[in-house]
Image (cartoon, rainbow, N blue to C red):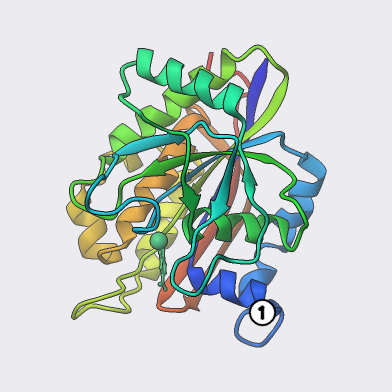
Amino acid sequence: MARITAGVATSHVPLLGVAHDQGKERDAYFGPIFAGYDWTRDWEKAEQPDVVILVYNDHASAFDMKIIPTFAIGCGERYRPADEGWGPRPVPDVIGHPDLAWHIAQSLILDEFDMTIINEMDVDHGLTVPLSMMFGKVDAWPVRVIPLAVNVVTYPPPSGNRCWALGEAIARAVASFPEDLNVQVWGTGGMSHQLQGQRAGLINRDWDNRFMDGMIGESDHLRHIPHIEYLRETGSEGIELVMWLIMRGSLGAATRLLHRHYHVPCSNTAIGHIVLAPATPSNGD
Ligand code: DHB
Ligand code: FE
């Protein structure tokens, strides 16, 4: 049986991809940021997940105003790094897991989540930066990846509660896949940041840290944070944090903290990273 063994959340700031690709991971500015991922890089090597369900948002790379899926799942064989204006990042193609992805798509849709199914797309920094942070420079990514794209770019994004429920449904889907697979769910984006307008550069350390506290143990209250609170407290792009709740929902009623890191600044952004395990191994049943 496939099992969700852990959840990882991380910011996906594009500047981290640039620092990584240009070998600046240990310089004075980026050193403290990348050091926060050292523990996770070692842990991932030991854990050897087979598949990561990577919850992320596309930033007008694969989708634009013509088509805006609220929830989309990648069922393809492979995905190329997107050209976001400076050429594609020099990182490996992302290899999918079509059998598990189609199984999850079927299970979610029969569970009444109306997923968009994607067989072909390029993946941008929202997906490739977390892979670089977790696995470093590699010739091939050491996991299969099922991209799960969420609209947090154009209003209205899905509610935190709906994201959590989707995470629960993903856990049910994974638990009903017969092959023995070690599966992780990652939620990306955040933390507080606003990239434009009068409040550009907004960062809210207290709110971010309370949100991270809330991910540990029983986190039910996080489901009910309204969009307007994300907007007011974490800036216009802080709404990306609803994606962390898909990961959190997939881990069951309570979690154990394995690792946590928070740093300001990174570009105009606060970055946060947390690694969680389900408190009870029977989640998804
Ligand atoms: C930036 C872009 C992002 O998508 C994000 O989540 C954080 C920061 C940026 O352009 O700096
Ligand atoms: Fe983003």
Q: Mark 1 is on which residue type?
A: Gln
Residue 140 shows in the view: yes
Residue 202: which quarter of the image? Answer: bottom left
Residue at 27%, 78% (x, y): give it: 200
- 270 with respect to 130 (left or right): left
Residue 220 shows in the view: no
Considering only vertical position in the picture, is 89 above or below 197? above
Quadrant of the drawing holding the N terminus: top right
- 134 with respect to 236 (left or right): right
Considering only vertical position in the picture, is 144 above or below 57? above
Residue 230: which quarter of the image? Answer: bottom left
Say what secondary structure mark 1 lies in.
loop
Front residue of 117 and 210 = 117
Seen as rendered, the residue at the extreme bottom is 28
Q: Residues within 10 Å of mark 1 (few under 14, many from 20)?
A: few
Q: Position of residue 155 (x, y in %)?
A: 18, 51
Considering only vertical position in the picture, is 224 above or below 202? above
From the Cβ of disc 1, is ligand 1 less than 8 Å away?
no
Residue at 56%, 61% (x, y): give it: 129
Q: Position of residue 204 (x, y in %)?
A: 35, 70
Residue at 30%, 64% (x, y): give it: 234
Count of numbered circles in the view: 1
User: Circle 1 sits on which residue?
Assistant: 22
Considering only vertical position in the picture, is 80 above or below 35? above
- 237 with respect to 208 (left or right): left
Q: Position of residue 152 (x, y in %)?
A: 30, 51
Residue at 65%, 35% (x, y): give it: 51
**Ligand 1 quadrant in view:** bottom left
Q: Position of residue 102 (x, y in %)?
A: 51, 22
